């Protein structure tokens, strides 16, 4: 099986508050951890989280919007392919100071 990342977002980078809000959700955190182990399909993530597919898709969209996930294409040995999701970060740093809260992300190694 192979993957090709294709994060095609064109919106501006998300703000720190949105990133922290996403991480406040247990289902989103479970998805982020699962996808840090390698690309996962929405079905695999639904099974992993014990949540409904609608909930998983909403959390996937939130994670995509905050740059925590990227879409990729996963090719199977039989030649078929499916959309999968993979974590784009491996480290998160939160700085609190007079100017507010700043979230810094470190990209996952390829």
Image (spheres, rainbow, N blue to C red):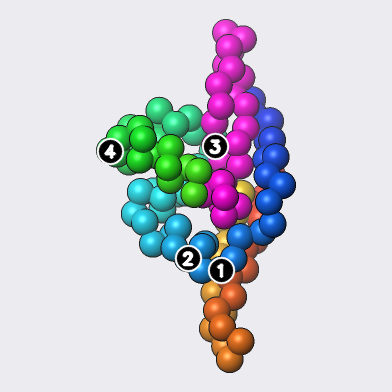
Q: Which of the numbered marks, if any, corresponds to residue 50?
A: 4
Q: If the image is split into quadrants, where does the N terminus sit?
A: top right
Q: CA distance from mark 3 to mark 2?
A: 20 Å
- Residue 40 lies, in percent from the top left, at 49, 33
- Labels 3, 2: front one: 2
Q: Residue furthest front?
A: 11
Residue at 66% x, 59% y: name it. 13
Which residue, given by chain and number where applicable, does mark 1 sit on?
Answer: 16
Q: CA distance from mark 1 to mark 3?
A: 22 Å
Q: Residues within 10 Å of mark 4 (few under 14, many from 20)?
A: few
Report if the CB atoms under discs 1 and 2 are less than 8 Å apart: yes
The label shown at residue 20 is 2
Q: Residue at x 35, y 48 (%)?
A: 27
Q: Earlier in the sequence, mark 4 or mark 2?
A: 2
Magenta residue span: 63-86
In front: label 1 or label 3: 1
Q: Which circle's residue, 1 or 3, is located before the other in the chain?
A: 1
Q: Is residue 30 above or below residue 22?
A: above
């Amino acid at each position: 099986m192979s993957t090709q990342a294709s994060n095609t977002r064109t919106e501006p980078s998300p703000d720190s508050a949105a990133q922290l809000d996403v991480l406040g959700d247990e289902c989103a955190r479970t998805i982020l951890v699962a996808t840090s182990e390698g690309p996962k399909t929405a079905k695999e993530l639904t099974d992993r989280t014990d949540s409904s597919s609608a909930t998983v898709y909403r959390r996937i969209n939130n994670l995509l919007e905050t740059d925590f996930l990227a879409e990729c294409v996963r090719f199977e040995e039989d030649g078929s392919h499916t959309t999968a999701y993979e974590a784009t970060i491996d480290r998160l740093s939160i700085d609190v100071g007079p100017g507010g809260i700043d979230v810094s992300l470190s990209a996952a190694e390829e």
